[in-house]
Image (cartoon, grey):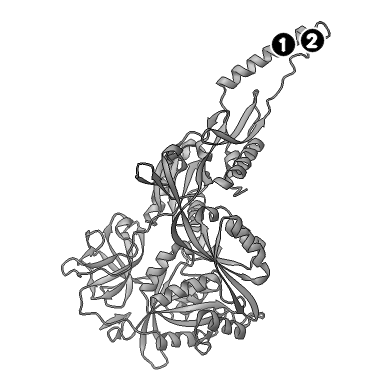
Amino acid sequence: MTYLWGVMLSSTSHIRNFSIIAHIDHGKSTLADRLIEHTQSLAKREMEAQVLDNMDLEKERGITIKAQTASMSYQAASGEFYQLNLIDTPGHADFSYEVSRSLAACEGALVIVDGSQGVEAQTLSHVHLAMQEKLTLIPVINKVDLPHAEPELVGQDIEDLLTLPKEDIVLTSAKSGQGITELLEAIVKRIPPPTDASREAFRALIFDSWFDSYLGAVSLVRVMAGSLRKREKMLMMSSGKKFDVVQIAKLTPRVVVVPTLNCGEVGFISGSIKHVQDTQVGDTITSAEKPATEALEGFIVIKPVVFGGIFPMEASDYPALKDSLEKLQLNDSSLTIEPENSGALGLGYRVGFLGLLHMDIIQERLQREYNLSLIFTAPSVVYHVVKKDGTQLKVENPAKLPDTNNIEEINEPYVLLTIHSPSDYIGAIMKLVQSRRGIQQNMEYLASRGKTRVQLTYSLPMMEMIYDFHDHLKSISSGYASMEYEHAGYKPGDLIKLNILVNGETVDALSCITHRDAAVSRGRYICQKLKENLARHMFQIAIQAAIGGKIIARETLSAFRKDVTAKCYGGDITRKRKLLEKQKEGKKKMKAIGRVQIPQKAFLSILTGGKP
């Protein structure tokens, strides 16, 4: 028997585990609020908008960054009580592994589609993930109370694009509460209960983890088999480490401490674990006394794919930057940091991220939560370099790239990019993707809400996407296009290292790995930006872009000129010539021993300026 806040439930038959799949801003968090409110999981005084979104960033941007759960007690129309476990998933491609693990913890999912916008790229991608996990899907059209909502056309959209029957659709308005009772009844009737494996050895899937100041690293789990009690010993199957179970609780989303977690249930386990790296997403927890023989499938060690340098504006802020990055790493095991020393920017860190959104979130949290003034170098990806002696290197920093003479081949990461857009913008979108070395894989016309939409699939180098691709896509499509991507392995490319020299000295912070065809335009762009932002000196400054020993672009910043002949009133021309020659010699000497300090605004103008 399973107990839920004083109500006895019969085994796993009265448990429903489900997730919510939706595109950004289609009402996922608001719908979760209504479900929690309707089941009275929180008192009215405890309710707030987007209660499952803990971070201000999540509420401001309308996105979910960390997976949250809410265990709700619901009395169905039949009079029976059910335990409904809502597992809220991140909604962006950067967190696709966490999404896959959250879906693996469920038996069903609600597919939310905005009644005025229709099916978008992210919804399609996550529905395919859910179908691979063999989940029962309940289509939901949200925001039906809006005057411009088109539920009939969107319903046809869902049937055509997602292959979900129109008659299964539930119409709701998360804002007003319309259709919430019907949705709860659909969850109870259509989503199957978990398989009863209560007599088997304990196995639980970790689908999220975080660090708590009092409890240590906490694991959010779905119990697949058996049960676990407080003070038992648990075993992490990927690392073999053992820990005592200190606390077991459920989230309603308020923390409710319980004595045990049984088969089919969702909750969190803490065991005074000091490092969040010991509670990796996708890992299996089992009992140390009676361990399971096999771990649950699907676990992989997630690795960062985008890297960037983070440096403090003031050298005195370096200890604060170190402290803040370590605190962020406690709650985000996918974040990797290593010290970096730049000749131009001083001491800082090379940080690895899961993708561009992940990088943007970390940067904003550093500036907002820790009040730091920082410089972020241009993002780069991990390249696989094959040397002539056969050895292979993984290079994420251009400074670590071997000499060109020792390189046999450089392989760069590619993504499979899917773009959904009205057909009116197809020409401009194809031109944009092809200018970024995209190779078309497929083009499909879809009838959506009575209009013609197109689905474009491209193979695209990841490096070409991480600058400002999304901004350009939104701009040329008037905001109507949406994109989704997944990693598609490595391919060899004609890549070279572009060095930037100022007054003959290489500025390592501005070096980058780029395609040979784009090297000249990139070099000219950086040289031009530096010329605009560097202060003039008493001597001439050469700003150059070079590939190896070959200069491919140059800008010259002219010197200040003091009129040394002003004091000469007439007389022999040789007097003026003598003073000018003396000035020339002085400038030559000054140029030889002088150093050019590159201001922070010059770096910021280049690194935030995107692709030329």
**Percent x, y for residue 499?**
53, 37
The answer to which image quadrant residue 400 occupies is top left
**Percent x, y for residue 254?**
39, 70
The disc, 1 or 2, on the residue closer to the chain's N-terminal end is 2
Q: Which mark is residue 312?
A: none
Label 1, secondary structure: give it: helix
Identity of the residue drawn at 63% across and 48% down: 612
Q: Name the residue furthest bottom.
A: 78
Q: Is residue 137 visible?
A: yes
Give the residue at mark 1.
Answer: 579
Label 2, secondary structure: give it: loop
The reply to whether discs 1 and 2 touch (Cβ–Cβ < 8 Å) is yes
Q: Nearer the viewer, residue 234 or 488?
A: 488
Q: Nearer the viewer, residue 367 or 413?
A: 413
Identify the amino acid type marked 2.
Cys
Q: Name the residue furthest right.
A: 570
Q: Which mark is residue 568?
A: 2
Q: Is residue 285 above or below residue 411?
A: below
Q: Is residue 111 above or below residue 232?
A: below
